[in-house]
């Protein structure tokens, strides 16, 4: 019967080898090939519930306002300050 240290070392080696084979690095028996596009798992399309919920979120959020070209087009001081900060962020970034 194997000792606990040997069992744990064996499990660790299995996990490392499995990880290396997924990543495409060198293993004990040479370099494992990098998976091609046909071997990689495809991203699953969003399920109907998530599409519905994202649509509801967009509908509840309303249409985003576009920034006015002229400062004189803003009627509210807070809104004008918001657009001013937006311009500053855009120019500095």
Image (cartoon, helix red, strand yellow):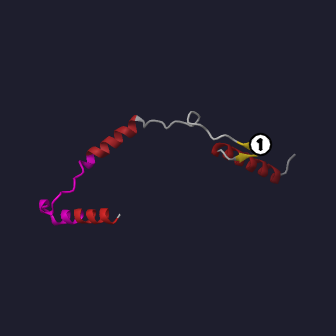
Q: Point out residue 17 in the picture as x, y percentages from the top left corner.
A: 72, 46
Vertical side of 77 occupied by 23: above or below: above
For image coordinates 85% across by 51% down, the residue present is 3
Magenta segment: does it hold 77? yes
For image coordinates 22% across by 53% down, the residue present is 66
Frontmost residue, 10 versus 31? 31
Q: Is residue 80 shown left or right of residue 11?
A: left
Vertical side of 40 occupied by 84: above or below: below
Q: Which residues are magenta?
A: 60-82
Q: Is residue 52 shown left or right of residue 73?
A: right
Number of callouts in the render?
A: 1
Frontmost residue, 67 versus 6? 67
For image coordinates 26% across by 44% down, the residue present is 59
Q: Point out residue 72 in the picture as x, y percentages from the top left corner.
A: 12, 62
Frontmost residue, 62 versus 38? 38
Quarter of the C terminus within the rendering: bottom left
Q: Point out residue 52 in the picture as x, y percentages from the top left corner.
A: 34, 38
Q: Name the secondary structure under disc 1.
A: loop
Question: Residue farthest to the right?
Answer: 1
Q: Is residue 11 shown left or right of residue 51?
A: right
Q: Which quadrant holds residue 24?
A: top right
Q: Which residue is mark 1?
A: 29
Q: Point out residue 5 in the picture as x, y percentages from the top left corner.
A: 81, 54
Q: Is residue 40 shown left or right of residue 10?
A: left
Q: Which quadrant holds residue 14?
A: top right
Vertical side of 6 occupied by 84: above or below: below
Magenta segment: does it hold 89? no
Q: Residues within 10 Å of mark 1 (few under 14, many from 20)?
A: few
């Amino acid at each position: 019967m194997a000792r606990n240290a040997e069992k744990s070392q064996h499990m660790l080696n299995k996990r490392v080898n499995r990880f290396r084979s997924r990543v495409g690095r060198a293993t004990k028996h040479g370099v494992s090939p990098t998976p091609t596009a046909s071997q990689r798992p495809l991203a699953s399309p969003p399920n109907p519930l998530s599409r519905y919920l994202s649509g509801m979120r967009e509908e509840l959020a309303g249409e985003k306002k576009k920034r006015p070209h002229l400062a004189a087009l803003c009627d509210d001081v807070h809104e004008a300050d918001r657009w001013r900060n937006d311009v500053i962020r855009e120019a500095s970034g």
